[in-house]
Image: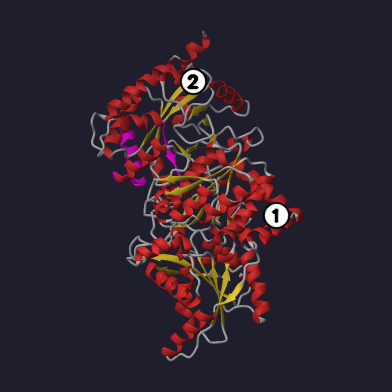
Amino acid sequence: MTTRIDRRMAKLKTEGRPALVTYFMGGDPDYDTSLSIMKALPAAGSDIIELGMPFSDPMADGPAIQAAGLRALKGGQTLVKTLKMAAEFRAGDNETPILLMGYYNPIYIYGVDRFLKDALASGIDGLIVVDLPPEMDEELCIPALKAGINFIRLATPTTDDKRLPKVLQNTSGFVYYVSMTGITGSALADTGKVASAVKRIKSHTDLPVCVGFGVKTAEQARVIGANADGVVVGTAIVSAVANVLGPKGEKTADPAEAVATLVSGLAQGVRSARLAAAE
Amino acid sequence: MNKPATPNSFRTGPDEQGMFGIFGGRFVAETLMPLILDLEKNWNEVRNDPDFRAELTDLSTHYAGRPSKLYFAEGLTKHLREVSSAKGLGGGAKVYFKREDLNHTGSHKINNCLGQILLAKRMGKKRIIAETGAGQHGVASATVAARFGFPCVVYMGATDVARQSPNVFRMKLLGAEVRPVTAGHGTLKDAMNEALRDWVTNVEDTYYLIGTAAGPHPYPELVRDFQSVIGSEARAQILEQEGRLPDTIIAAVGGGSNAIGLFHPFLDDKDVRIIGIEAGGRGLDGIEHCASMNAGSPGVLHGNRTYLLQNADGQIMDGHSISAGLDYPGVGPEHSWLRDSGRVEYVPILDDEALEAFKLTTRVEGIIPALESAHAIAHAVKIVPAMDKDQIVIVNLSGRGDKDVHTVASMLGMEI
């Protein structure tokens, strides 16, 4: 099967540049604003969208994404609404891949079969579920693959060569390399180490490798993008939303515009990545 | 929920995947997976290693003060027989306390901490992190870290830091750093999230000393095994003191480590009735309780599938209990399995009932129990008067109540 993710990655390969993968939190700070952010992403230069599913207990996330999730939940976001948001976006854009990213419990409670059916109907292309390692593949990964939805696995600095084949076994779409041990939004790891880790993963798989955790600026996106097939930015985007919210959550500027400005800069970063590398 | 088929033994779990039926498992981020596999490998190496066992036994004996006594609670028994007579029943079983409150650090938590610190030492780890609710596990962790020369960071919800200040001070005296966690309601669930975030960041040198029989496999199994000394001793002690097994055993369940420790050696004694007590808080009608097995549903949190307090969207709720140690919206996965299999009954006790049992035990036994343990005693107070005089009940007195005097004073409207 080929999915929107496969097609988008193939297209970028012919263009000779890495993908810009943008994460934002569904429902932050409210449904309508969040949908306007999502709709602004492709025009600003996002190649792949990660739509965050808020969870009350995000164990792998730093303070910025924790706060974004709580704002979304306070704003009434649910998994039902997150899927609806994807469907509304999809009605106007049939090309940009959408990944759902989050934790397993809301999906488990929704019901795996019902979730996969509704996710497909909403135009979802892939899933990133932080707390489902390969040991738990029977839960969601295998059913998702059968349903035709990519399951994107995280590989980390602790995933050694012996373990890597197990992590890659049922991965599809791309491999998400977590640049350091830690939570989202921490300082970026040594870029030299990241480059060699990407090389190591690529020796085990033909899948594209995207790198995330710690990328905040266009310059970092350029440096990381020189050696990876994609660059994932999340914390910087949810922070851009937080920065235009007042103490009571009121909007002091347009969050969609704030995010679009940031993403445009990041997009220039990834577009200059290979040029810089070729010099 | 389909009831699982009754197994030949209730003591063989978990399976190789860390599952107790549908419960348990390893629902963690990939970064932690290699660490958990490494822990499992080391655990399997030492669990039957005579040298490891000998070192643990020596420390348990001379450092922690084991075996803990099995005490005939004559004052409480007499009181409950009077209650029985007043009701015209003329009964009242004999009540025994398993005195985990007499252990070094004042609770059962030391049993697990001694086992895990020896494991951390074997694995060459350099730094200990722990989460704590009431502070009992934090104190026990800080204690073994001091004893073995490890730096120790304890994550504790900000609400619990405020209501358990004596334990916070003890941890600091022992050289641990206490990091208050303000996320959520600032209780045990939030402390556990933050400890996991620390662990996922400091993977090279850090040992996560989980305090209860929950979390990703192998923690529920290894914590249970270290705590099973409670039930093994109690079983041998009651056979020696009474010449027979008890009719009923009772323990309070937060995460459930003192309970699984008492229960596990009795699980295949089919005539022994086993009752776990959940925190009923202010009642099960609203959300001000922590009775995940009575009022929750199965879900995935903190590395395992288990009964949780959650809403229809799968978001975890903050519960409530007068007792910080029971203030957790989940429970260890083996308890969830024992619940569904029907082997163990789980019943709620309200804040007020626990407080009454706390006061009663103090008055008639001269023992100030931890509020957690007071929940278990409160259930004994309910059922013992209707039992026969020749029946026997063992209650796990999991900890002493010195840490709770501020909470109790404020509930009674007194200043100290």
Q: Which residue is mark 1?
A: B47
Given the image, on which type of amino acid does mark 2 rest? Answer: Gly
Above or below A251: residue B372: below
Which of labels 1 and 2 is toward the front?
Answer: 1
Q: Chain of mark 1?
A: B
Instruction: Write down the region rendered in magenta.
Output: A75-104
Residue at 61%, 75% in the rendered image: B270
> Left or right: B17 with respect to B280?
right
Given the image, on which type of amino acid does mark 1 rest? Answer: Arg
Helix, strand or loop at mark 1: loop
Q: Which residue is mark 2?
A: A225
Q: Position of residue B151 (x, y in %)?
A: 58, 42
> Left or right: A158 with respect to A55?
right
Above or below A201: residue B332: below
Above or below A2: residue B188: below
* Residue extending farthest front: B416
